[in-house]
Image (cartoon, grey):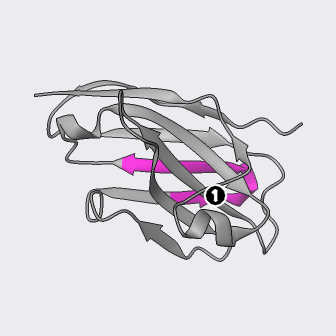
Amino acid sequence: QVQLVESGGGSVQAGGSLRLSCTAPGFTSNSCGMGWFRQAPGKEREGVAAIDSDGSTSYADSVKGRFTISQDNAKNTLYLQMNSLKPEDTAMYYCAADHDARRTRQLRSARTWGQGTKVTVSS
């Protein structure tokens, strides 16, 4: 069973930055997609950003211009650079991957998930 392992979460003040990383072996074929999702306490999970194997990206409106998703296929690693963080970005962030990029591209679902990394932004 493939395991996705996130790292890079932590606590930061509003306006600060964090970079999340996710090791994701086995998701480098042309049909694969990867993404980041988050879930705040008491709220539903939401898609944050996604990237296809060709580098095409999609973002939730709430993070456009502040977050950047990228991948290093040689290292089987997915990244999420988060700048200008706001208290409302506080959540558990999950790395996700799917062999069918149509799932992740729409920021709705995926079939393989990491355990999550916590991000806390204080005002």
Rendered image quadrant of residue 110: bottom right
Residue 38 in sight: yes
Residue at screen point 52% across, 59% down = 70
Looking at the image, the residue that sits furthest to the right is 1
Rendered image quadrant of residue 100: bottom right
Residue at screen point 61% across, 63% down = 104
Q: Which part of the image, by quadrant, shows the N terminus?
A: top right
Pick the front one: 122 or 108: 108
Q: How many dots with numbers?
A: 1
Residue at screen point 30% across, 32% down = 90
Kindly identify the amino acid type of the residue bearing the numbered disc 1.
Met
Report whether 74 appears left or right of 13: right
Position of 41 relative to 39 (above/below): above
Pick the front one: 8 or 59: 59
- Identify the residue position indicated by label 1 in the image: 34
Q: Secondary structure at mark 1?
A: strand
Q: Position of residue 22 (x, y in %)?
A: 61, 41
Question: Dominant secondary structure of the magenta stretch?
Answer: strand
Q: Position of residue 75 (x, y in %)?
A: 72, 49
Q: Position of residue 98 (x, y in %)?
A: 74, 58
Q: Position of residue 2 (x, y in %)?
A: 84, 39
Q: Is residue 45 magenta?
A: no
Pick the front one: 36 or 7: 36
Position of 38 relative to 10 (above/below): below
Tell me where the magenta segment starts and ends, as one range.
70-81
Q: Is residue 77 magenta?
A: yes
